[in-house]
């Protein structure tokens, strides 16, 4: 199995499972977490959490993976991170990450990002990672830039919730 559990100094990055059902529901019903997401409405029913988990549990090889960020000190689940749209032949994927607001600005996502970016480069043989981030999501942009992502363009045609929903595209290129 390519995707395995990872860890940082303060976190376990646990492969998503159906044991995470309640957490996924809680995470993606949180207004602050969902504020800048453009790919899905906030969850309305716990069964929708099952659909998300099922998506990330497809048999390998698969083009997506998600980890649950769990604090080592107390076992509290605080966010998720992972990859999607992995094109293995080109060595390109997209990255996504989210964190409950109570844990913002504590360095948790930076720890997780450092670990999964190394995993992408070394284990997935990724040459380029893209992050599509809403322009007003300054904290997410700051995290991406901290790890060397650079502005590569902007999506303008995305319509979501009945309005234009532009996104900055930031790219981390390992081939340079």
Image (cartoon, grey):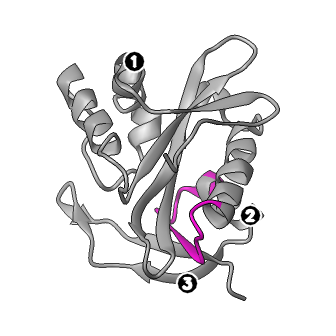
Does residue 100 appear anywhere in the picture?
A: no
Measured along the vertical axis of the image, is residue 128 above or below residue 24? below
Q: Is residue 43 left or right of residue 150?
A: left
Q: Is residue 13 left or right of residue 41?
A: right
Disc 3 is placed on an element classified as strand
Q: Residue 4 is drawn in which quadrant?
A: top right
- Residue that numbered label 1 is attached to: 19
In-front residue for pair 3/97: 3
Q: Earlier in the sequence, mark 3 or mark 1?
A: 1
Q: Residue furthest top?
A: 74
The verdict on residue 131 being magenta is: yes
Q: CA distance from mark 2 to mark 3?
A: 15 Å
- Residue that numbered label 3 is attached to: 152
Q: Residue 159 is drawn in which quadrant?
A: bottom left
Q: CA distance from mark 2 to mark 1?
A: 31 Å
Q: CA distance from mark 3 to mark 1?
A: 37 Å
* Crowd class of label 3 (few under 14; some 14 to 19; many from 20; radius 10 Å): few
In-front residue for pair 116/164: 116
């Amino acid at each position: 199995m390519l995707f395995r559990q990872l860890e940082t100094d303060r976190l376990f990055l646990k492969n998503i499972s159906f044991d995470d059902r309640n957490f996924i529901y809680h995470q993606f019903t949180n207004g602050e977490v969902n504020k800048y997401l453009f790919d899905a409405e906030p969850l309305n029913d716990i069964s929708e959490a099952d659909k998300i988990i099922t998506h990330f549990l497809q048999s390998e090889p698969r083009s997506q993976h998600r980890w649950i960020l769990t604090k080592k000190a107390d076992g509290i689940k605080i966010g998720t991170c992972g990859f999607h749209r992995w094109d293995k032949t080109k060595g390109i994927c997209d990255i996504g990450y989210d964190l409950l607001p109570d844990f913002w600005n504590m360095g948790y996502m930076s720890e997780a990002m450092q670990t999964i970016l190394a995993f992408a480069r070394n284990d997935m043989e990724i040459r380029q990672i893209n992050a599509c981030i809403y322009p007003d999501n300054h904290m997410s942009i700051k995290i991406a830039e901290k790890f060397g992502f650079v502005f590569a363009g902007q999506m303008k045609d995305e319509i979501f919730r009945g309005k234009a929903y532009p996104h900055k595209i930031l790219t981390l290129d390992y081939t340079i």
